[in-house]
């Protein structure tokens, strides 16, 4: 069900049940229906092997956050005692081409601004925030449906190559940008930064044969493999090039991993 918009005054509010309800950006309704998930090698020569076979997936209606969760959102949760501060010493921070990712490197000050997407959070913390907010993490299928719509487009905005007006990617600056900085990159349902800015944790365990026959039992509300070692990550980031921004692109990280290029958004 689509929740009403809450006034965004940055404070955590207590609702009637005494549960902590955070002031959140609005959510977008995604109607029930079927869509093409994955990548078809005949249409997209850039498919990676964990992206095919393409298949039709059916989802119930759901809602997804319009933007990535911001530092302001996450700090409100920390202040309310429902979330924990990210452990930056355990975060793999992108420092540029010379040294690449460095464990525990200082995160550039710009990236910690209130309106930038939260990052350096692990999967458990992302899930915890969403649950505290009365939401959950989107499944891979829900994430991809919200990013692509119904017409098998390669990117949230269509089939044209990314540029900095559509997605904050490699070449658009060395950091995250405030969420919703690239409105031309909105997906058909209106979701922003589904490509670029930060990549995003999703609920499912990830498997490189995720769409292979081992995990094909359900094409209705799929939730991925029953068990695994790594959780799914979706969407490119400010670190990634054009091919990483394709809506079918996927990879996995250990649930305890923290990276300066990975944040999240919630669904319900």
Image (spheres, grey):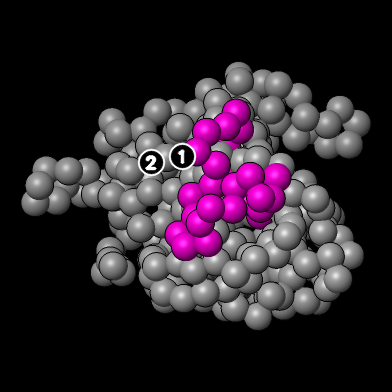
Q: Nearer the viewer, residue 137 or 44?
A: 44
Residue 63 falls left or right of residue 258: left
Corner quadrant of residue 182: bottom right
The image quadrant of residue 43 is bottom right
Residue 175 image point, x, y percent? 71, 46
Mark 1 vs 2: CB contact within 8 A: yes
- Residue 20 falls left or right of residue 196: left
On the image, the x and y values in percent for residue 166 come to 71, 70
* 232 in the magenta segment: yes
The residue lying toward the viewer, choosing from 62 and 71, is 62
Residue at the extreme left of the image, as rendered: 16
Residue wearing tag 2: 129
How crowded is the residue under tag 1: few (<14 C-alpha within 10 Å), some, or many (20+)?
many
x%, y% of residue 173? 78, 52
* SS under mark 1: helix
| Cα distance in 3D space between marks 1 and 2 | 5 Å
Number of numbered discs on residues: 2
Instruction: Residue at 50% x, 28% y: name it.
Output: 86
Range drawn in magenta: 209-237
| Residue indicated by mark 1 | 126
Tell me if 128 is positioned left or right of 22 in this view.
right
* Quarter of the image with the N terminus in it: bottom left
Q: Which residue is at a point 53% across and 61% down the rendered structure image?
A: 219
Magenta run includes residue 140: no
Locate residue 83: give its quadrant: top left
């Amino acid at each position: 069900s689509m929740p009403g918009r809450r006034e965004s005054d940055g404070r955590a509010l207590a609702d009637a049940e005494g549960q902590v309800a955070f002031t959140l950006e609005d959510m977008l309704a995604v109607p029930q229906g079927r869509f093409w998930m994955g990548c078809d090698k005949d249409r997209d020569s850039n498919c990676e092997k964990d992206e095919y076979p393409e298949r039709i997936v059916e989802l119930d209606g759901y809602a997804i956050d319009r933007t990535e969760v911001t530092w302001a959102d996450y700090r409100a949760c920390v202040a309310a005692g429902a979330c924990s501060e990210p452990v930056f010493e355990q975060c793999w921070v992108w420092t540029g081409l010379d040294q690449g990712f460095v464990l525990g490197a200082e995160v550039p000050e710009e990236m910690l601004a209130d309106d930038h997407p939260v990052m350096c959070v692990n999967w458990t913390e992302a899930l915890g925030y969403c649950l505290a907010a009365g939401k959950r993490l989107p499944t891979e299928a829900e994430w991809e449906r919200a990013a692509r719509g119904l017409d098998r487009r390669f990117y949230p905005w269509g089939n044209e190559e990314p540029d900095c007006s559509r997605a904050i990617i490699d070449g658009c600056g060395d950091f995250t940008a405030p969420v919703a900085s690239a409105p031309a990159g909105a997906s058909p349902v209106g979701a922003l930064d589904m490509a670029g800015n930060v990549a995003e944790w999703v609920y499912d365990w990830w498997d490189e044969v995720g769409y292979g026959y081992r995990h094909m039992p359900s094409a209705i509300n799929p939730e991925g493999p029953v068990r695994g070692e790594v959780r799914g990550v979706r969407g490119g980031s400010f670190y990634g090039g054009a091919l990483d921004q394709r809506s079918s692109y996927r990879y996995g990280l250990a649930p305890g991993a923290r990276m300066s290029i990975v944040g999240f958004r919630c669904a319900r």
